[in-house]
């Protein structure tokens, strides 16, 4: 059995202690008898006498006490090395239990493998707890912010009708319906992300011709894209693949709606293709693109660039997070890079499993 970490340290310490004890007895006894024989041989017992003399008893007592002190010294040193990280973990656990999620344990001597691993695992757990708490606060603030505007508009309009400030025929019900639809999208996006984060998203996989599904979504959004000055061009692969058609349609809808809100007027290319064992969907616009720092976090919930915030669009900040969640649920991934035209290229890929 190969000894590593804490086991190795204990075995090594005990071995060193035993060697020191044997050397102490052997060398000490040799010195004691050599000195005693030179001073007064009568202090020593006769060769055929099994009973030690009083001087020999004193020597046995002295070497026993010294051996105990040596053993205690080694034990205290080893215990301190072992208990220092364990006590640090215990103290940090107590602080976390009282709400201090910033508490971290100190590993101390990392040669004790098991205790160092214990400290590292605790620190990772504490970091995840702290991040989870921060995410909850961020989500609560962001959701409250997203809900405030439509709820305020609806409440103000309805209150005006109740108070007689507005007559029902003067109310723009189309605008109110748009606010309600926005709330519905926000709720559905939150539900999708919640299912994905909890691992409860259930996909209805079936052989699907995505050329038709994507074409249907594009036709629905065509008027809105044209109004935004975007010219959508489709280049779709006709190969049937296994996927959840409704979820992939949700991905395409979110990508096109994001482009409608934030992309510069101009061409908009939506392509699908088979790449080895993956089905790849890309959407490429002509600009304005986004900084590399933002591109790395663009799929985080409620993450927007400065330009997006300035536009004050009706987006919830969850669309691209939903895209990433659905891609991961299919065993794939979503990414954002800069296109050759200087815009953004969104890529979603997942195992194709093409059906003959």
Image (cartoon, rainbow, N blue to C red):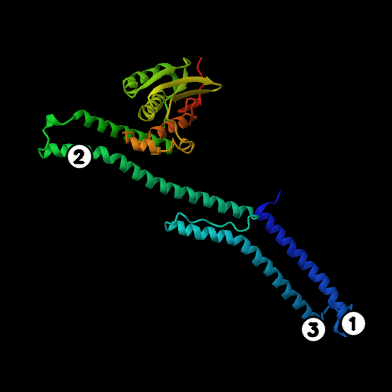
Q: Quadrant of residue 28?
A: bottom right
Q: Which residue is mark 2?
A: 155
**Rounded to the nearest whole Å, what is the CA distance between mark 1 and mark 3?**
17 Å
* Residue 32 showing in the rendered view: yes
Q: Which of 192 and 224 lies nearest the eye of the viewer?
A: 224
Residue 246 lies, in percent from the top left, at 38, 24
Residue 194 in view: no
Give the SS element for disc 1: helix
First of labels 3, 2 by sequence position: 3
| Mark 1 nearby-residue class (10 Å; few <14, some 14–19, many ≥20) | few
Q: CA distance from mark 3 to mark 2?
A: 102 Å
Task: Between label 2 and label 1, give the one nearer the viewer.
Answer: 2
Q: CA distance from mark 2 to mark 1?
A: 109 Å
Counting from the top left corner in percent of width and height, residue 80 is at 62, 64
**Residue at the (33%, 24%) spot, across then down:** 228
Find residue 120 and name its label: none
Query: What residue sits right under mark 3 in the picture?
Result: 54
Numbered disc in front, either 1 or 3 = 1
Residue 90 to residue 323: above or below: below
Q: Is residue 68 above or below residue 39?
A: above
- Give percent across and percent down for residue 53: 82, 82
State the residue at coordinates (67%, 55%): 7
Residue on which disc 1 sits: 38
Quadrant assignment, res 106: bottom right
Please determine whether, in this image, residue 120 is positioned above or below residue 316: below
Marks 3 and 2: which is nearer the front? 2
**Relative to 149, residue 355 above or below:** above
Q: Earlier in the sequence, mark 1 or mark 3?
A: 1
Q: Secondary structure at mark 3?
A: helix
Tell me, yes or no, whether the two marked residues, 1 and 3, touch with CB atoms within 8 Å. no
Q: Nearer the viewer, residue 139 or 57?
A: 139
Look at 41% across and 48% down and name the residue there: 134
């Amino acid at each position: 059995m190969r000894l590593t970490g804490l086991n190795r340290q204990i075995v090594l310490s005990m071995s060193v202690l035993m060697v020191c004890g044997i050397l102490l007895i052997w060398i000490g006894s040799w010195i004691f008898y050599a000195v005693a024989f030179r001073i007064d041989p009568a202090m020593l017992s006769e060769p055929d006498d099994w009973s030690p003399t009083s001087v020999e008893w004193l020597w046995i007592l002295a070497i026993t006490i010294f051996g105990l002190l040596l053993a205690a010294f080694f034990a205290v040193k080893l215990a301190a090395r072992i208990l220092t990280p364990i006590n640090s973990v215990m103290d940090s656990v107590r602080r976390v239990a009282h709400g201090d999620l910033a508490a971290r344990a100190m590993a101390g001597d990392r040669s004790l493998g098991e205790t160092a691993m214990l400290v590292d695992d605790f620190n990772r757990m504490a970091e995840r707890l702290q991040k989870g708490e921060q995410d909850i606060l961020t989500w609560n603030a962001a959701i409250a912010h997203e809900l405030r505007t439509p709820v305020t508009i609806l409440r103000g309009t309805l209150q005006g009708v109740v108070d007689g400030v507005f007559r029902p025929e003067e109310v723009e019900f189309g605008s109110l319906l748009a606010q309600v639809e926005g709330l519905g999208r926000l709720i559905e996006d939150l539900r999708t992300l919640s299912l994905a984060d909890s691992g409860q998203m259930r996909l209805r996989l079936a052989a699907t011709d995505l050329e038709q599904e994507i074409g249907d979504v594009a036709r629905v959004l065509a008027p809105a894209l044209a109004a935004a000055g975007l010219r959508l061009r489709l280049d779709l692969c006709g190969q049937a693949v296994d996927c959840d058609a409704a979820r992939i349609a949700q991905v395409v809808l979110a990508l096109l709606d994001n482009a409608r809100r934030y992309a510069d007027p101009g061409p908009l290319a939506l392509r699908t293709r088979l790449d080895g064992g993956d089905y790849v969907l890309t959407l490429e616009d002509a600009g304005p693109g986004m900084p590399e720092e933002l591109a790395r976090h663009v799929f985080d919930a409620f993450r927007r660039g400065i330009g997006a915030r300035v536009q004050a669009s009706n987006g919830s900040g969850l669309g691209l997070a939903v895209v990433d969640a659905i891609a991961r649920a299919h065993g794939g991934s979503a990414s954002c890079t800069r296109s050759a035209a200087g815009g953004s290229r969104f890529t979603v890929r997942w195992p194709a499993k093409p059906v003959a």
